Each structure stands twice: as structure tokens, then as C-alpha cells.
Image (cartoon, helix red, strand yellow):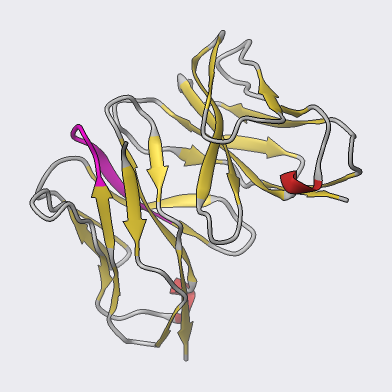
Amino acid sequence: GDSVTQMEGPVTLSEEAFLTINCTYTATGYPSLFWYVQYPGEGLQLLLKATKADDKGSNKGFEATYRKETTSFHLEKGSVQVSDSAVYFCALSDPGNQFYFGTGTSLTVIP
Amino acid sequence: NAGVTQTPKFQVLKTGQSMTLQCAQDMNHEYMSWYRQDPGMGLRLIHYSVGAGITDQGEVPNGYNVSRSTTEDFPLRLLSAAPSQTSVYFCASTRGGRTEAFFGQGTRLTVV
């Protein structure tokens, strides 16, 4: 079945460091791919998305490219801020509208 | 826009009690789902619905019931609460077509 595997955390970075969170997926059809962010005590919020191969999603300085050949959707940001501290989830939506989530990666950015 | 609204935000139950977690969305989405979030396990699907009157089981349905009498509402019922159901519960909705899901703020449930 479909699944998402993402980099285990927790990740701790200094402010202005480069961030990469790896995400790979397994899917039988042509899924849409998403990154969600969860701040403490809150629900998941959509960070960015991509609906087809080679699409690049971007938002708030974060980027991820839908790579069909490597079945990956890695999240990157060039310079993280303390306010980026949160848990990040990679997810896919299959043609049947079922969502599959990774286990989440906790990011802490220290000043 | 209210989006997806869940109530209550926090709840403490005694083992064996029953309760209903409420979820409502105002986006006219056909698809609604309930997830539970536990440390190190991501989100696991409990039940989902593809439209009013249609529900189905997800990955971890035991101990939970759902119904979908209207497009807007999708309540989750715990029939006889157990400590293993201590978790954070999220309701989500999507209009389908592989578009994004919108999440409520969550209900933190503790069963003692």
C-alpha cells in the first residue's frame, strides 16, 4: 500500500542554518504531496504542496520538489529562524483521497 | 472562515465512560476524517467519510463509532473509554481531487 517515510528527529539547528528534512514515498498511483507544520498545541497547517512530478512547492522560504524518479519530496529552507521550531509532517494524497502521513520530524531552532 | 472546528479542546474521562468528540466544517467538503496522534506514530486514521450517509473504517477503528448525517458534521463517539485511547484527536476535511486536507485544532483526551 501507499506510505510515507520521513527523516527521524529531533533536529536541532542554530538560527540561520540550512534545513533539510528528507521524505520518500511509496504509491501505486499518482499522488499529491504535502508538507504540513504543527506548532505546539495546534492542529496541522498546510505548509506547501505539489501535485505532479517536477512541481516545486514553496511557502515562507520553505521549498520541496516532487521527484518521481527518486520518489522523494524533501523539505528545505536556506536560513531557519527560531519561529520555525515546530513538528513537520510529510504526507501524500492518493487518487482515492486517502491521506498517508509520515511520523513527523521535530525541529528546534536555537538563537 | 471558521474552517474545521473541533470541540472540546481538552477532556478527561474515566475508564468505561462514553463521550462524543464534535467536528464541523463550513467549506462544503465531501471528505472528512478522524485521526489520532500518538508520540512517534504520526497520524493514524480512525474512520473516514466520503459524503453524508457514508462512512468507513480506517487503520485503528476499534472502540470508536462515527456517523455522517450532514455534510458539515462528523462526530466521533467513544463507546467505553480505555486508557489506550488517551491521545490527541484531529478531525480533517478535504474537497477531494487530491487537494489538501484542513485540520481542526485537536482534542486532547486523557482516560484515567
The stretch drawn in magenta includes residue A86: no
Residue A48 visible (yes or no): yes
Image position of A94 (left or right of B43) = left
Residue at 33 percent of width and 64 percent of height: A60
Rendered residue at 82%/37% (across/down): B81
Position above or below: A103 against B23:
below
Q: Which of A44 and B47 is in front in this view?
A: B47
Residue that appears at 47% across and 39% down = B102
Question: Residue A69, percent across and down?
Answer: 8, 51
Q: Nearer the viewer, residue B65 or A81?
A: B65
Quadrant holding the N terminus of chain A: top left
Above or below: residue A6 compared with residue A19:
above
Give the residue at x 74% y 47%: B84
Q: Quadrant of residue A12?
A: bottom left
| Number of numbered labels in the structure image | 0
Rendering coords of residue A41 (x, y %):
64, 59
Please say if A10 is above or below B32: below
Which stretch is magenta?
A26-36
In this image, A25 relative to B82: left or right? left
Residue A48 lies, in percent from the top left, at 31, 52
- Placement of B23 over or under B112, stated as above or below: above
Residue A4 x, y percent position in the rendering: 33, 50
Image position of B40 (left or right of B112) = left
> Can you see residue B3?
no
**Residue B5 or residue A94, whichever sits in front:** A94
Position of residue A58 in the picture relative to residue B107 (left or right): left
